[in-house]
Every structure is written in structure tokens, then in C-alpha cells.
Amino acid sequence: MVFLPYFRKTIKYENKSVQIMSYAHPEVLVDTEWVLQNPPNENRKLVEVDYDPVNGYQKGHINGASLIWWKRDINDPVTRDIIGKKEFEALMSKNGITADTEVILYGDFNNWFAAFVFWVFKIYGHENLKIMNGGRKKWELENKDYNTDEPQITSTTYVAQPPDEGLRAYLFDVSRALGKEDTVMVDVRSPAEFTGQITAPPEYPMEHAQRGGHIPDANNIPWATAVNDADGTFKAVEELRQNYESKGVTPDKDVICYCRIGERSSHSWFVLKYLLGYSKVRNYDGSWTEWGNMIGNPVEK
Amino acid sequence: MEDKTKRGLAIKETSIDEKLNVKADKGMIHDMDGIGHWVPIRWYFSKDSYDLSQVVIHAEAMDEKYTKLRELTCPDDD
């Protein structure tokens, strides 16, 4: 029997009781209008997370938002890894965030990197955390204002939790999971990447791998199948449930998501863990640029 | 004129390439830091203003640029 973690809610509509399904954790999402009506203050911080801040934050951002630059701020500058606990604490301090602060993340590229940063915040135990549904894409579609002023921020003292390694899959976790029926791999890349037709789109010449294809037995469920194409917002819970369960990605399984560098997969990790409420979902941030470059790793096309 | 090393790159805008002062299809390539850079993919030299020999000069310059790049990464021992 499969446990359904998302909630059924009963609401009154035209004097009738109607049952609707909502996300398992609706508190992790806010919409653009809410952000407009609830500007940042001492206890609430708005953070734009960009892959490309030159063409994003620096050209204009939501009033009061600070910047986390994915490459500079969230990755170790030398070793390929996310930042350590001390660097995370320093980043929080620089952004005026305390352990109790409500943080709203949004960003470029359909919130891919905002989702990655959400994942890193969760690794270090930050609780009050939300994503602005639709990110920059929706904000811009609605012709809402940007400005270029950087907020004045008073630095804070932040004490992070020890890293929650249960949210992260490493190469050896993936290798061990091969052939196990209770673990399911979700490859969220495009079908062309999944089949090995390309290893990276031409826009990202630095992200290629030596081999194209996918991890054996992985399911190809592209990240984009979880969002509404028109505005980048997440699909309704019933559509999401159908999207994953029809491919055997069910809540009773141990789920590992991967893509090319781990950012699109953190978007799908967010969907599975917070919108559908799956209890065991990990993001394999080494992803294809690790798996497809290792000598001897099995590859399926 | 087309830069074949940019094949497959999505065209995001068509505007004047300031280097050659010619209308061009442009795409964006992201570097190691994630920063996007506009790059021309295809140039439209008007027949009214350019003859083939002028276009060939630009094509040869582009070819020379890529030959030098190849030499940097895979130098020819000969």
C-alpha cells in the first residue's frame, strides 16, 4: 500500500463542501503578489539567487532583495563541493539572516538555483524558508517593478546545524543503489541529454562530460514537467502526483534526483519532498558531470 | 556569414554586432562563473554595402582566430 503524504482539505464553495488536494507543505511557497505586499524587514529577508547575476540581479531585482550568487557564494572556491558550515554561517551573517529569520528565495533560470540554495539551507538546518513561486520569470511577466539599489544590511551572528547528509546523495550512494528495487533514480534532464544525444546544451560549454547517456534504470522525468510553462509556477498537486507515480516514483521508495550539475535536480527534489511530501528524497549534486566522467561507471543510452 | 562553432545555440535576439557593424543573430554562452555573454552566430552582410571579397576577409579572420585557439589547446608538433 502506498502512503499518500499530501493533504486533502475540505473547503466551502457555493454552500457545498468541496474536497481539494493541496501541497504537503504549502508553507514553503509564496506567490509574487504576497512578496509585493510583504516587503523584507528585520525578521523577513528576501534573497535573489542567480546563476548569472550580471544579467539578473545587477540589471534589477525586487526591492530590498540581497544577492546570493550560486557560483561565488554557495560553492567552495577550490574543491567541487558546496560551502562548509562556517562559510554558510558567514554567508547568512552577510545577508542579515539569523536562525529565526523568515527567508524568501527567488531567482533566475526558473528558480533552479534558488531551489539549490533552498537545499543547502536545509542541509544546514534553516527552518523558516520559502520559495517565491515562478521566480524572476513570473515577476517579469506581471511587469512588477525592479530596482538596482542594494539593501543596507546589518550583519548577524548565525549558528548553523551540522550538515544533514540525509538530503544528499554521493557517488557511492548512487553506485550502491544500482539494481536495488527500493531505490528509484530520477534523471530530470532533457530527453536529448538522457539519451546521450548531447552532454550539455551549447549555452553551457563548460558542463560537458566524457560520456553521454544516463545512470542505468534511471527514469527520465524532466524538471520542466513539474512546472506550468506559461509562468514557471509549480503544477497542481494532482498533476505532480500523476507525473511521478506513473513512472514508478512513489512515496514508499528511496528517491535520488540528478541532472548535470545538481541545480535542476534540486528543483525536482523540492517538488518531491515539499510539494508531494515524499519522506526519502536525496539530491545527487555530483550529477552527470561526475557520473559521466568517471572511468568505469556504467552508462545506459 | 555563419560561425559554425556556435551551431545549435539558440538565437535570443537579432541586433547590430558592434564589432562588424552588421546585423547579426545572437545567442548567449555562459562561462565558468555562470555569467552569460552575447555572441554572434550569423551575420547578415547586405549586398548593397558589401561584396563577397569583403565578407571573405571577415570569414578568414574568424578562421584564423579558431586556428590560434586550437594551437593553444592542441599544438601541432610539426
Image (cartoon, rainbow, N blue to C red):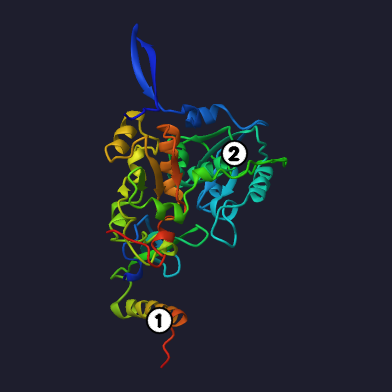
Image position of A109 with respect to A253: above or below: below
Residue at 40% across, 77% down? B66
* Amino acid at the residue labelled 1: Thr
Per the image, label 1 sits on a secondary structure element best described as helix
Residue A195 at x, y percent in the picture: 28, 57
Residue A152 at x, y percent in the picture: 69, 41
Q: Which residue is mark 2?
A: A125
Q: Which residue in the rendered view is the most extreme toward the top?
A: A15
Chain letter belonging to callout 2: A
Chain letter belonging to callout 1: B
Left or right of A49 on screen, residue A89 = right
Q: Which residue is mark 1?
A: B67
Q: Which mark is residue A69?
A: none
Q: Dot 2 surroundings within 10 Å: few (below 14), some, or many (20 or more)?
A: some
Image position of A19 with respect to A210: above or below: above
Residue at 67% across, 49% down? A86
Per the image, label 2 sits on a secondary structure element best described as loop
Depth check, front residue: A215 or A189: A215
* Amino acid at the residue labelled 2: Gly
